[in-house]
Image: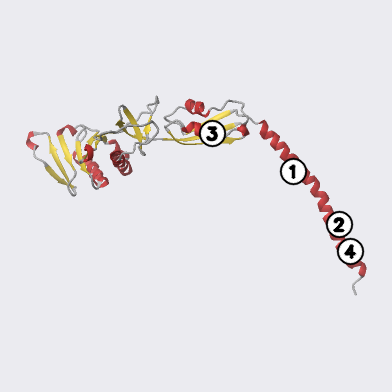
Amino acid sequence: MMDPIQINQIPNENKVRRRLGLILMIPLLGGMAALFVLSTEWKQALSVQWISVNGAQTISVREIVALANLPMKTALYRLDLYDVQQRIMAQPFVKSAGAHRWLPGTVAIDIVEREPIASINVGQWRLVDGEAVVLPNIESQKKFDVPVIIGIDGLRADRVGLPIMNKELFKAIEVLKQAMTLDTVVYHMISEIDMKNGGDIVINSSDGGVPVILGREDIAKKLLMFETFWSQFVNTGEAEKLKYVDLRYEDQVVVRWNQPQESQPKQLSL
């Protein structure tokens, strides 16, 4: 038989262990509470010492800092970062903005700027981005080499920073986006896009201002034909010999030259 004294020893040992565990837990919990209090006090003592700005190219860092309106020595953890973001977003060139804290004393601001894709006349010349948002005139070291959109009647900008809801403008921007998707070289080959008030779309080349008739269908394919033709048949400085290029025909480029001996249209298959 098992010794009865040994039977009673097992539960007694478990009780002792539990008591020891509770005794050891008390200072551990006290230490954690003390650390929490100290960390809270430390956080409350932190203040804004630096402001970091990332993504500003068109807009100056100074303007972003002014828009953020973060006085130095402001309590870091009392800042409403959402309000900071909204103040920065008031600048129409800012597409998105984020702000977060970097310990011990930095507010980091990250912005994404709107990229102008074209210039339009809305009573005065304004830049627009790929969403047809009208952008303000701004002093910047960054220069914008963008095509001009013409041939759309009645364009008006209700307010800078808002998009112009016009289907012809969206169509023109889509043409330019397709050019950029093919190659930025193709995009920069376009100096002007004339929407002809709903007629055949015509682009004017950057080299020589040669009219290139696109029509309205298969724009991406025709832009590729335009690039291929230009690279194969138009040497640098010879664009003035061209009167126009017509891409409205299936897999063909119709060309009219300015020289009398080549006055008749010439068809090229690419």
Give the mark, 2 or 4, whose residue is nearer the N terminus: 4
SS type, badge 1: helix
Q: Which image quadrant for residue 144?
A: top left
Amino acid type, residue under disc 4 in the picture: Gln
Q: Quadrant of the N terminus?
A: bottom right
List the residue tagged with mark 3.
83
Give the mark, 4 or 1, whose residue is nearer the N terminus: 4
Give the mark, 2 or 1, whose residue is nearer the N terminus: 2
Find out whether the residues at labels 1 and 3 contact each other: C-beta distance under 8 Å.
no
Give the mark, 1 or 3, whose residue is nearer the N terminus: 1
Between 154 and 26, the one lying in front of the other is: 154
Give the mark, 2 or 3, whose residue is nearer the N terminus: 2
Whether residue 238 is visible here, answered yes or no, is: no
> Relative to residue 46, is residue 199 drawn left or right?
left
Whether residue 30 is visible here, answered yes or no, is: yes
Which residue is at 44% across, 29% downward? 59
Estimate the spatial distance between the alpha carbons at disc 4 and disc 1, rounded to whole Å: 35 Å
Estimate the spatial distance between the alpha carbons at disc 2 and disc 1, rounded to whole Å: 25 Å
Pinpoint residue 32: horizontal percent, then vertical percent.
74, 43
List the residue tagged with mark 4.
9
Q: Which image quadrant for residue 49?
A: top right
Estimate the spatial distance between the alpha carbons at disc 2 and disc 4, rounded to whole Å: 11 Å
List the residue tagged with mark 1.
32
SS type, badge 3: helix
